[in-house]
Image (cartoon, rainbow, N blue to C red):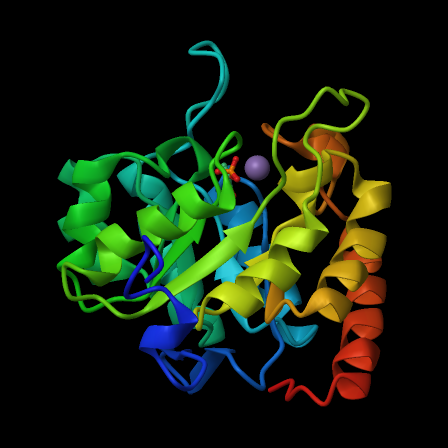
Amino acid sequence: MKPFKMAARESHENDTLVPIAGPERTIYIGEGYCTIIAGPCAVESREDYLEIAVQLKTMGVHILRGGAFKPRTSPYSFQGLGRSGIVIMAEARQLTGLPLISEALDVRDLDYLYEQVDIIQIGSRSMQNFPLLEQVGKLDKPVLLKRGMAATIEEWLLAAEYILNRGNPQVILCERGIRTFENYTRNTVDIGAIALVKILSHLPIIVDPSHATGKWRMVTPVAKAAIVAGADGVMVEVHPEPDRALSDGKQSLTLENFQKLREQIINLAKIEHKIVL
Ligand code: PEP
Ligand code: MN
């Protein structure tokens, strides 16, 4: 038996399909679907967030992203708006009818996030925050588990196991690149991990080509490669004016470039016989 028992394909005959119950309709992540998540790295202001949320809705995005509790490398960098950022996201949810994803950094914010967002994100830096994993494991809420930047695939699946074995089966994995000797890019995308996870596990897996590369020009090609490798969707950072983003501007797509990415992803999804809602 594999060390990750509940995450292992052997334990679950069919691929897991995670329903995301939005205010207007249910979106799915997993077998048979190609799901597109987009939004800015961080919620920066109410006006900007609501505006981009409306634009992304008209462009056919399925789920809105936005960071309110930001795990920044430097304590001097913008740390996010905290709970007031989540309030803005909740307003965007009402306005657009789109479900939300946002990161939980601290167990103390989980009750609050539980009420407001549709998917709780566990970031790369928190992948082995076991108390946090155990707490989201007790929730009836989908969890997006990003791969730790220095985590092996086995460590990642064991982190998923912490959530599953506490009773929450709604785990979605997210490949976001790993640390290697290469430093031209922010991280090194592990496309092979997507194909391997599909063999080892029944859990859905998406890719985040924004953090995986750190360069907006690489986002669309890498997103496409991930879909062909078997990913169930993508999560990308989009900013109305990347040059003035408070975080991750270099890897953020403009709305125009996001539109191009979306068209190309939808074309590939059709070839792969995936449903795009
Ligand atoms: C994010 O998606 O907002 C993020 C911080 O990414 P990661 O945890 O992969 O660095
Ligand atoms: Mn970011």
Q: Quadrant of residue 245?
A: top right
Q: Nearer the viewer, residue 138 or 215?
A: 138
What residue occupies the far front of the structure in this picture?
1
Location of residue 21 in the rendering, given as x and y in whole percent from the top left corner: 34, 80
Q: Is residue 149 left or right of residue 67?
A: right
Quarter of the rendering containing residue 91? bottom left
Q: Residue at x 24, y 56 (%)?
A: 163
Residue lying at 47% horizontally and 36% vertically, measured from the top left: 148
Q: Position of residue 67 (x, y in %)?
A: 45, 42
Residue 85: x and y, percent? 37, 43
Give the residue at x 31% y 69%.
Answer: 170
User: Residue visible at 65% across and 85% down?
Assistant: 276
Q: Quadrant of the N terminus?
A: bottom left
Q: Position of residue 82 (x, y in %)?
A: 32, 35
Say which of 23 and 204 sits in front: 204
Eyeballing the image, is 256 above or below 245? below
Q: Is residue 43 left or right of residue 248?
A: left
Q: For residue 237, say whether it is visible.
A: no
Judged left or right of residue 29, residue 208 is right
Q: Quadrant of the C terminus?
A: bottom right
> Above or below — where is 256 with respect to 8?
above
**Residue 245 seen from this side:** yes
Q: How many marks?
A: 0
Towards the viewer: 226 or 26: 226
